[in-house]
Amino acid sequence: MADYKDIIASCKDQKGGIIEAFHALQQEFNYIPREALTEAARVFGISEAQAYGVATFYSYLSVEKRGKYIIRMCESAPCHVAGADELLKAIEKELSIKVGETTSDGKFTLELTECVGQCQATPVITINSEPLFNVTAEVLPQVLSAYK
Amino acid sequence: MAEEMRVLLEYADKINPEIADEYVKIGGYVGLEKARKMDPNDLIQEVRSSGLRGRGGAGFNAGMKWSFVPKNAEIKYVVCNLDEGEPGTYKDRIICEKNAQALLEGMAICGAAIDSNQGYIYCRGEYPFIVKLLKNAIKSAKELGALGDFNIEVRMGAGAYVCGEETALIESIEGHRGEPRFKPPFPGVAGLWGVPTVVNNVETFACLPSILTNGAAWFAGIGAAKYPGTKVLTLTGDTNNPTYFEVPTDYILRDVIYKLGGGVKGGKKLKAVQVGGTSGAFIPESNLDTPIDFDSMGAIGAALGSGAVFVMDETRDIVDIVSRISKFFEHESCGKCNPCREGTFRCREIMEKINSGKATQKDIDNILLLSRVMKKAALCGLGQAAPIPIESTIKHFADEYARKIV
């Protein structure tokens, strides 16, 4: 696993690039570890409180540990009318977790999201930002089984 | 008239958007070449007289926006808004996937007009694959020498709807929380890192190459006189054909739904259509014969916005959908100003009360009062637009509310 210091250093030449650094950290760890947040604040010359303020403003950034695969369920209006509520219940049942939780084996984290811009094939979920289309309760087990 | 008119998407799926050379073969980068030979003032005047207005939703004349940039400033920036957070909207993604080079060319044309050699594309965090596509597209254009000394950097957002507001977007590029700034000063005077900055939407930039190539008069002659050109729409909800279309701006809303969209799914009747994304007004069947352009939509109390068209059939529960929408705004409010932070919270609270059958007429009166306050007092477009779906449905679909209140 790459060192968080190297990841942050690779972004330091981008003016205001702390959000780019956070993305790069999440690419590696799926969240922003505490020590990485401290280091990023130092490298970009802001206080740790400010860095924390940035990291917690954006819904795609997390300062809490998450699973290997992050499932995001879209609940915006087009997905809502296509049955997002039923699908959400099916995901929670299938994985035995609620929104915001991670499965005990550390594999899946379930989050809600607003529109991901794939409304041609609703309802939509994303797994680690890859969009999956027309997901229904029936096909859900098959969809999830592809993620080992 | 029921045909699409493809300008931006004319070569969709016929060229690889990442390869600049393929774009050049179909006449790409001719507009930029022309722009570079023009006097910047004439170039701005040309864009201004084409009548091109912002495609992100605000509908401001693009050339006029550029003319506000002070000539004597040493550093200036061109920023592309690819935040596209408005639910039901994916037209900017489609423009990038089908014709990314036109966006790059458009940004460079703007660079020539305001004398800037640095552009930024702010791409929403939901589209990491578009970030990759754009980086490849920029690399290809640079290698070909098509962009000259104009550089473009791609920055990725991280899931904040409010960053579609131009000053919040600027804050985010600077590495801050994406909270809107007080205006004035406007970005044209003091924008990214405090220097003059033009922020335009993807579709606005992508219109520029054809305007320069074919001339301002050509563009001004397409579609509606006061909002000329084409518009890329995304059709969602209860439609037989949930996809994207490019149409002239005088295209009729009814034709979008019934001709391009093939009508309402399952042969059902239409109840409502929401245009412009989740912040748009709900439009009843009786207003369907309205052209989609900015001013015609405004005249019926709606907005073209991002060009999202969300169709709801006769079985849909309007109050339930508006409750969901009010939750969206509560979640996306950045919390900087009180009217929005508190207002979106109360809107959601009252909408859920109505939706669960526990509200009275007094609650409807209260939410209408709150709507007026938010529209007048919120700092940015988010808080000002958040009550629009509520107000428009109370106006046009009063029965839906009446049957839920006690």
Image (cartoon, helix red, strand yellow):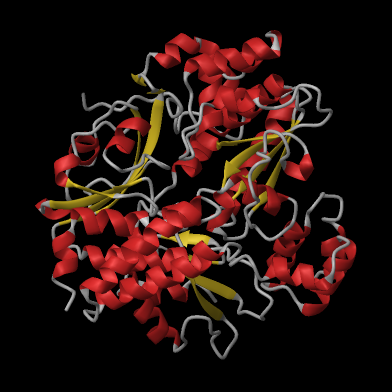
From the viewer's side, name the closer residue of B241 and B182: B182
Q: Residue A109 in the image: state x and y as whole percent.
A: 54, 79
Q: Quadrant of residue B115?
A: top right
Which residue is pictured at 84% across the width and 56% down the height? A10
Q: Is residue B266 left or right of residue B19?
A: left
Which residue is pictured at 56% across the width and 34% down the height? B100
From the viewer's side, name the closer residue of B373 and B359: B373
Note whether B345 is above or below B340 in the view shown.
Answer: below
Q: Is residue B91 left or right of residue B3?
A: right
Which residue is pictured at 59% across the width and 13% down the height? B45
Q: Residue B39 in the image: state x and y as whole percent.
A: 70, 9
Q: Which quarter of the rendered picture does the N terminus of chain B lie within?
A: top left
- Is residue A84 among what the camera can see? yes
Q: Residue B219 in the image: state x and y as whole percent.
A: 44, 16
Q: Number of marks in the image?
A: 0
Q: Is residue B115 left or right of residue B325?
A: right
Q: Residue B4 in the image: state x and y as whole percent.
A: 30, 28
- Is residue A82 among what the camera can see? no
Q: Quadrant of residue B218?
A: top left
Q: Which quarter of the rendered picture does the C terminus of chain B lie within?
A: bottom left
Q: Quadrant of residue B194?
A: top right
Note whether A34 is above or below A96 in the view shown.
Answer: above
Which residue is pictured at 55% across the width and 18% down the height? B47
Note whether B185 is above or below B252 in the view shown.
Answer: below
